[in-house]
Image (tube, grey):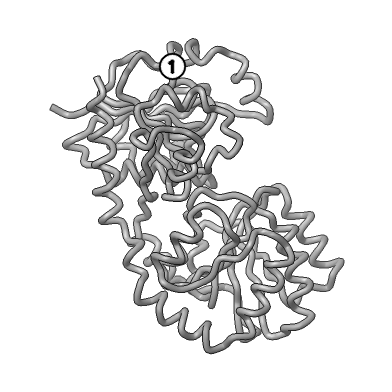
Amino acid sequence: MKKKILFVTNHFRFSNGVATVLRNLIANLDENEYDISLLAIYEFNQEFAAPIMNKIKVIPGYNFYFRGFDKLINLIPPEKIYKKFVKEKYDLEVAFQFGIPTKCIAVSPNPNKLCWMHTYDSKMILREYYKKFSKVINVAKAGRDKMISAGFDRSMCDYCYNIIDEIPIIEAAKDACPITKSHKYSVVTVARLAPDKAFMRYLSCIKEIVKKIKDVEFWIIGGGSEEEKMRQYIKANSLDEFVKMPGKQKNPYKFVKAADLYFCCSYREGFSTSCQEAALLGIPVISVNVDGAQELKELSRCGEVLKNDEVDICEGLTKILENEKQIKKWKEQAVKSKEVFYKSERVKQANSILEAGMDNA
């Protein structure tokens, strides 16, 4: 008999990293083993879900969202939200995102429940809710270790690397990159152009770097709330020659594959999916010190982790870009180690965690 699993998330739509991770996970679960239900509290996009629609039962949530709506929903007791949407019994319930999903499943009467933590809750805002789960699954060892240090029992802390399906990424990366590189090196970043991704700080660093190194260009791929502000900064500081912003892209991989280095500049990450995607394409990754950065460096055996501040980013990137020999070695090593990020082992790990999560009754 199939095991029934319920996944609960905030949104299931395009341009949402957690939704993409969940879609990849579901796509790689055996439909002969699992009967999967999906509840998106706010938005559910049919086109985004199309690749897995034959594998899931969709539980309708509120089906809309506006800025501030989550604050209103947070005023409702999570028990009421749970009862409103969850009508069946499941062998396992998984809160796949921070906020309402975590609160709702925490108060579920079902003893078989897991919490997925994508970005470490550094302020432990939901500490009392985490205690109600049999396990909290982080997406990097670093997050798991932080939970243990925060006082949680080691037995309830685990990690599971996000499943990334390399096949469509490698295929998409074969498309021609529309940017014609005009400098010796290109450094690419793919992310939402939002404050937490620290792009204004990054542009300030680029302004200083190109005073010393002229033969480099920086590609920033994505769209978001800070896009116009960034474009104005680039123009005001005469950085047009060095910074290319092609906007939001359905296929960012053709840009990543064509670049020499990938850079993550975020203030916070769980275990950056875009960094791992760059690594599986054989591109060396440089990252500021966020969760997962050191693990990625160890797994790929190349790249660098910089302190998460403006001074170290400026100095670190400048030093790296001045070292042609090191970049050459990194590029060779990145190609050798890229298969470490392929999905096969991660699917086994995810299945093991889900199966173990059903044994708490």
Q: Return the residue at label 1.
A: 107
Left or right of 298? Residue 225 is: right
Q: Nearer the viewer, residue 144 or 254?
A: 144
Q: Nearer the viewer, residue 168 or 187?
A: 187
Residue drawn 39% across the image and 49% down it: 162
Q: Position of residue 113 (x, y in %)?
A: 34, 26
Answer above or below: position of 77 versus 54. above
Q: Quadrant of the C terminus?
A: top left
Q: Position of residue 317 (x, y in %)?
A: 65, 74
Answer above or below: position of 60 versus 11. above
Left or right of 213? Residue 255 is: left
Q: Position of residue 67 (x, y in %)?
A: 68, 31
Q: Nearer the viewer, residue 228 or 277?
A: 277
Residue drawn 28% across the image and 39% down it: 353
Q: Residue furthest left?
A: 1
Q: Is residue 180 visible?
A: no
The answer to which quarter of the image holds residue 32 is: top left
